[in-house]
Each structure stands twice: as structure tokens, then as C-alpha cells.
Image (spheres, rainbow, N blue to C red):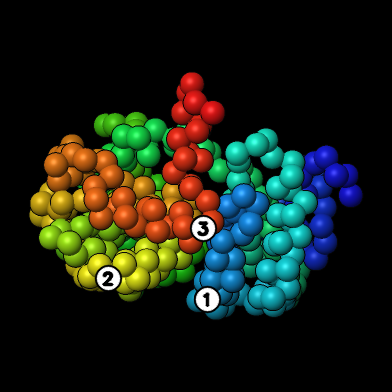
Amino acid sequence: MPDSENIVYYNGALRPEREVGISIRDRGFIYGDAVFDATRTFNGQTFKLREHVARLYNSLRYLRIDPGIDPAELERRSLEVVNHNYPLLPPNQDLWVMQRISRGVESSEPDGEMCPTVLIETHAIPFARRAALYRDGIKVATPSVPRIPPRFLSPRAKTHNYLNLIMGELEVQDTDPDAWAVLLDEAGNLTEGRGSNIFLVKDGVIATPQGRFVLEGITRSVALDLAAGLNLPVAEKDLDLFDAYTADEAFLTSTSLCICPIAAVNGATVGDGQVPGPVTRQLMAAFSDLAGMDYVSQYLAHLPGEG
Ligand code: PMP
């Protein structure tokens, strides 16, 4: 295996990334009939990999896909890929670690069996593209496209079907290319963005939509745990645009963003405009302590003229 190029795990073996292609008849490509999960590294160390893999296996069970590999092996293989690829990165970078499993390749035989496609790959987190978010805050906008109701397709599974979230994102970016979409449900409650959960802070209480209506982000759970550890009250409840427009602070959570402040919702400045607000700042510091590195400085170092 060449040491100088990225590898992936593909259907049972480690291979150079450039040698691996997915079949044109793969159900993940044809129908979005696949699941995935994404972990990140901090200084090359994976964070909450076991939790991400556990969520992946719940997504697999929801789609009734038997991956033919157990969670411990998938975790072990993920670490092999990371340990090979991380040293190939330039300094002050970290990796996204993706596991993707599709139902497999459609067979032309009438009773041909499908074998799941199992891929583990890594790529660099786009620090430079996102660095300004930690200086200025994220602009969130809610599109007219509602989040698909959970009884149609559960948001709790992380599947390859992201079109609903992408349609919302396209709509808000037509108006503001820098805006991040957070979709409302049909009743007008906040749900989530294409890759993030939303939190509002009001009168010291940290609130986020209930786990039944969103992908329960691993970072969302970390943020709730950190808040509890800091004796800050938390609530999982319905939140609408009134709550967003009257919040003191707001932030998004995701594996790559960790905790990132929101500056405005639909053009309305959040709270007094301080980014991040005091509660968000406390949580961000606690997150860095837990991750074992100052993730905000890592992002800010990628601003033009820094680092
Ligand atoms: N919601 C959706 C739809 C997502 O894709 C993600 C990213 N995995 C999240 C929320 C945030 O989850 P996590 O904190 O595990 O990255």
C-alpha cells in the first residue's frame, strides 16, 4: 500500500482511494438506498467514533440492511484508514471520517442476491471556507420547503436521501449565498439543517428541538451533557420562529462545526448581537476541553492573513 496517498476501506480490504469506484448499478447511487455517518478527528484522534458507529447501525436497522460487518470491526477499520491518512494532511488540518453502506449493486439476474457496498473514507474538513463563521456567526434562514414529516421518512436515520434538506438549502442560498438553512416542520417548528442541529438560549435555558423530529446529533448530545455538567438548564421542546426571534443566543452543532454561534435568523439579529453570547461561549470552551484542543482557534487560524 503506497504510504504517500489516501486509502479507503472498500468491501473488505484497504485500497488506494484513486483505485476505488462505485458501480453504476449501486442502489446508493441509483436510489439513495444507503446510510452513512461522519466522525471527525481532533489532532488526528477520532472523537465519539463508537457513538457514530452505533448511530450508523441504527440507520442500517431502520433500512433493513445487513452490512455483513460488525460494529467493532467497522470501528477498527475506520481507525486504520484514519491512522494512514491523517499524516498525509498539511499542518493544522483534521479529517472527516465517513462510513457509507448501501444495499448493494442491482443484479440483472431475477433472483440475484445483493451484497452491501461498504466504504470507509476520509477527507479534509473545510476549515478555510468556514473560519469566518467563528468570527461573525452563522446566518440562518428558514426556507418555505418544510422538513419531511417523520412518519414519511424518519429523520433519525442518517440515510443518503438528503434532497429535502438540499432543496431548503438551495432556496435560502438563492437569496443569500452565505445563509445556512434550518427547515421548519409543517407546524412551523424549527427542525434541523443539512448537517446540523439548532439550539436557542433564552433566560439562561438552553433549548433544542426534540430528538424524535431530527437526527439526534452526536454533538447535540455532547452539548446537552456539557450544559448539564455546567449546571445550565436544558429543554428539548418545540421551538418556532417567535422563539428564534426573541432568543438571547443561538448556535448550531455538528460534528465538524462542534458548537458555532448564530448571528441572525432570517435577517433578525439574535439577542444583542454578541457573537458568541456568554452561554454559548461557555459551552464552546467546555467543548474544546472535552475535545482536547481549542477547535475555535483551529478554525480562526485559517482566516486569510492568519496562521
Ligand atoms: N442533522 C442532520 C440532518 C445531519 O446530517 C447532521 C450531521 N450528521 C446533524 C444533524 C448533526 O449531527 P452530528 O452532531 O452527529 O454531526
Q: Position of residue 25 (x, y in %)?
A: 68, 56
Left or right relative to 169: residue 232: left
Crowd around label 3: few <14 · some 14–19 · many ≥20 (10 Å): some
Amino acid carrying mark 3 in the image? Ala
Q: Secondary structure at mark 3?
A: helix
Residue occupying the point 56% across, 61% down: 47
Closer to the camera: disc 1 or disc 2? 2
Whichever of callouts 1 and 2 sits on the residue coming sooner in the sequence is 1
Q: Which quarter of the figure has residue 198?
A: bottom left
**Compared with residue 154, is residue 277 higher up or lower down, i.e. above or below?**
above
Identify which residue is drawn at 45% across, 65% down: 218
**Disc 2: residue Cβ within 8 A of ligand 1's nearest atom:** no
Figure quadrant of the C terminus: top right
Which is nearer the eye, 206 or 143? 206
Side of 123 where 270 appears, left or right: left
Q: For the residue labelled by badge 1, is the local secondary structure a helix, a strand or a loop? A: helix
Amino acid type, label 1: Asn
Name which residue lies at 74% across and 41% down.
88
Which residue bears the numbered disc 3? 291
Question: How many residues crowd around disc 2 within 10 Å: few (fewer than 14), some, or many (20 or more)?
Answer: few
**x and y, in percent, of residue 111 in the image:** 73, 75
Residue position for label 2: 231
Residue 86 is left or right of residue 217, and the answer is right
The residue tagged 1 is: 58
Mark 3 or mark 2, earlier in chain: 2
**How far, Cα to Cα, is label 1 from label 2?**
31 Å
134 on left or right of 206? right
- Label 1 vs label 3, nearer the camera: 3
Residue 305 in view here: yes
What separation in Å lies between label 1 and label 3 (alpha carbons)?
25 Å
Q: Which of the 4 image quadrants contains residue 275? A: top left
